[in-house]
Structure formats: C-alpha cells, structure tokens
Amino acid sequence: MKNSPFLAAALALSLAFGAGPALAQDESTKLLDLLVAKKVLTGKEAETLRADLVKEKAASSAEKLKLSGPVTQLSLYGDARLRFQYDNLDQQLPRWDPVRLRWLDTGNGDQRDRFRFRLRLAADFQLKDDWFGGVQLQSSQYSDTGNQTFDGGFQNYGVYISRVYAGWRGLDWFTIIAGKQPNPFYTTDLLWDPDINPSGVVERVDFHKLLGCGGEEETIEYAPDGKTVVSIRRAPIECPWTLTLITGQFFFDDNQEFNPPGRNTDAYLFEEQLLFSLRFCGQAKFTLAPAYLRYNSAQVNTVWNQQGFAQVINGTGTDGLPLGWGETRDLSLIQVPGDVAFRLCGWKIKVFWDGVYNTDGAKRVNDIYVVPERDKAGNIVDFDRVRNHAAKDDFAWLAGIQFGDNAKKGDWALNVNYREVGLGAVDPNLNDSDWGLSRLNLRGWKASLGYNFTDAVVAQVSYCAADNLRSNLIGGQATGGAKLADANSVQVFQFDLNVKF
C-alpha cells in the first residue's frame, strides 16, 4: 500500500468526522465503501481506519455523556411555548317567550385574557434485548393541558410527571407498552386532547410486517473479477400499505371500592383501533382508522352537584333532580377518523375528518346530565322520568383542510376545520380544551396559521368561534352543576410562540 492514498483517506475521514459525530458515522461508512470500490484502500485497511475513527469518537467531547450499561440509545428533547389567550363565554340563561311559546337563551358575557406558558422536557431511551421507555416532565398538573398562567407576584411554578412508561418490541410486528405514555391512537382533537398522556397498557400488532410486506433490499457490489465482494448495501423497502391493530386498557379513576360498601368500583377506559394506510399516485396517502372506545360504567367517587364538587353517589341536587353516577357511565363510542394527504403545486395538503357516535347517548343525557324538560311556567315535566334527549346529542363530527407544514425555516401552515359536538357524544374530560373551552353542545369553526422563523421557532395564531347546538338545556349537571354545556357561544383567540430544542 502507498502511504499517500492511505493518509489522504484518513484526512478525508477526519474532516467528515469533524462535521459532527452523528453525521460522521454515516459519512465515513459511505466514504470508506467508495475508497474500497476505487481500489484506493483494501478492505482490511478500511476496517483499520474505521476502528481508529471509532476510538477517536469515543474520546471526543461530544461523547462525554455517559450512559448506563443497559442503555443503547438516549434522545433528549423538549419545547417551550409562550401564549397569550383571550376567551369569551356567553352562558345560557332561560327566558320564556310568550310569542314563540318556548324557552329562549339570553347571553351573559364571561371574558378573560391570560399570559401563559408551557414547558416540556422529555427523554426516550432504547435498552438492550428490545426494551425501551421514556419520561416527560411538564409545567401543569392537568391532564389536558401543559399550560401554566403567569400570576401570583413572580412566584415559581411546579414541575409534574406527564409520562413514565416502558415497552418491549421483541418481535418486529408486536409491541407492548405499559405506564403513562403518549397517546397511541390515530385521532383528532374531537375526541382526544393532544396533551393527554393516558395511563395503562397498550398492545400493537403490525399485520403488514407479520405478512412480510416491506423489509430490506440488499445490493451487492463486486470487484472486476466478479467474485470479490466490495460492498453490501441494505435499504428499507417501504410497504405501500399498512394495517395495524392498536388496543389500550387505561386507568381512569381509582375509587375506594367499599366506601360506601359494595357501591364503588375502579373506572377503566378501553379502546380498540384498526389503522389502515395506503399510498397511491406517488406521494399521495390515504388513512382510515375506525375505533371503538368504552368505559366499564363504574361510578366515580366525586360527582358534581348543584353547589359544587361533593362526595355524593346518586344523590339529589338543590333543584330536586337526581344526580348521575359520574363521568364514566354510558359512553360507548364508535369513531371513524381519517385523512387524505397529497401535494399540489408544491404544497403539502391534507384533507381530514372525524366522526363519533355514542350508542348510549340517550342514557347519558337523561341519566347522567339529567337535563329537565320544563313547561311554560318553568316547572319540570314528569319529574320521575326526566327526558330531554335529542338525536343530535349522540353525534360529534369534524371536517377540515390543512395547507403546508411547519417543518423547517420559512414554512407556512394553515389549518381550518368545522365541527359539531353533541351533548352526549364525547367525554368532556378527554376532548380538546382549546376548542370551545371543552364545552359540549357546540358547533363552530377553528382556524390557525403558523410560520417558522427557524427550524425550531414557530409562531402561530388561532381563533375559534362556536355556538350552541340546542338552546333549551337548562338545569341538571349539563348546565347547572358540572356546567358542561352552559354556553350560548364561545370565542377563543390564542397567539403562540413555540421553541423546540
């Protein structure tokens, strides 16, 4: 071997390594393969250089972060968001109209503006023997938001655990995860707030992998003699279709089972989803993810009454109406979210939708929210059998379109959607708190526009305007105690500055 080619190769590899450890490892492998193919180096000399560079990398300052023995890979990341928010809520107040002979609503403005922030710090790690896990800390204790309002005379703010989970991926097509984890389902914010990290166990079966779709393509390069292997390259083969079953069993509420004796049971949430995707016409992609979500109908210890939050089970409020048994009863939801993503004139475009139907919607409205039907004098009609359910209460749906994607510096993204949310269609503990302040019985629009100042800094402005679906919901837990559907109209304006790191 001549020294000059070897030294030149070593210098080129050192320069590649100086671009950064993560980049250098990939670039050095490609460069070594090229030098062997050009007969500048032999295979043995290339391996010697590769070993020397690995030693140099281990001694560099970038590698001074020491990981424990079982950890094979660690990713640290997070984001900080500053937000200004203004919202206005006009409440339903009953008024009898003697001309129209029905109850009407009268507005009552409830306005506020707040400066808020959200901080999230996360770590994902890979372990030996196909195990993995993750943790996340955030700046709020509430499940559906990481927001913290600036207040209290420059006081400090708490940090809370929002994720802690572990998983196993011992089979290419099967994964199981346990703990407080990222939402595993394909969904929109119609049913699941994107900030919620459910607690429980999730199983995932990738049928396309089980059936052998995808895999790797192997390319072998030979020397001119046709026998000596110069290089072997492997590239993943993307499957044009995917089919995945996702199942989850989540802990919703831990009750005192024998207080009162024999009445309480723990509340659980179960969801099963079949996620299908298909690529067509080059870069276009169709996704459909039907799902079924249900609770075990257990009552929750703390139930809203007419005076506030109280420890009551099937009690009676101040208006004489029976109180329900809690959030988890009579929810049996069929969901059909999906989207079509494609490019048009260089723009990324996605048309998306979602639909939810509660098969137990009538029971939830009548037995849990106990919305009374009143006569002209304002008295409850047929007190023993309160019934004020409507078919639209059982449905929620959403349709929207997005132009662009906030991925890198200079990107714009516009998202517009319309939705209707019936009184008994979704769980107000899970749906998006930024749309209609989580209220039910609403219909309206939301639009957001985002711009990337850099790859990591994004500004976004959003506006939501919604009005009620039904105007005769007066009393019960829907508008009296829990105040889940007490709005005539809701407007929410938000300006965000997001920094990712």
Image (cartoon, rainbow, N blue to C red):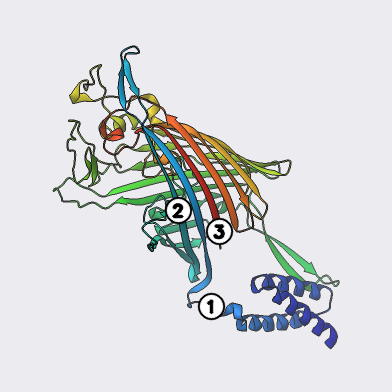
Q: Which residue is mark 2?
A: 116
Q: Residue furthest front?
A: 153
Q: Is residue 372 left or right of residue 235?
A: left
Q: Which numbered mark, 1 or 3, is in the foreground of this view?
A: 3
Residue at the spot 32% in from the left edge and 25% down from the top edge: 389
The reply to whether residue 188 is in sight is: no
Q: Are marks 1 and 3 in contact (CB under 8 Å)?
A: no
Work out whether 264 lies above or below 235: above
Q: Which residue is mark 1?
A: 65
Distance from the alpha carbon under mark 2 to that under mark 1: 34 Å
Disc 1 is placed on an element classified as loop
Tag 3: Cα neighbours inside 10 Å, few (<14), some, or many (≥20)? some
Distance from the alpha carbon under mark 3 to that under mark 2: 14 Å
Tag 2: Cα neighbours inside 10 Å, few (<14), some, or many (≥20)? some
The residue type indicated by label 3 comes to Val
Disc assigned to residue 499:
3
Distance from the alpha carbon under mark 1 to that under mark 3: 24 Å
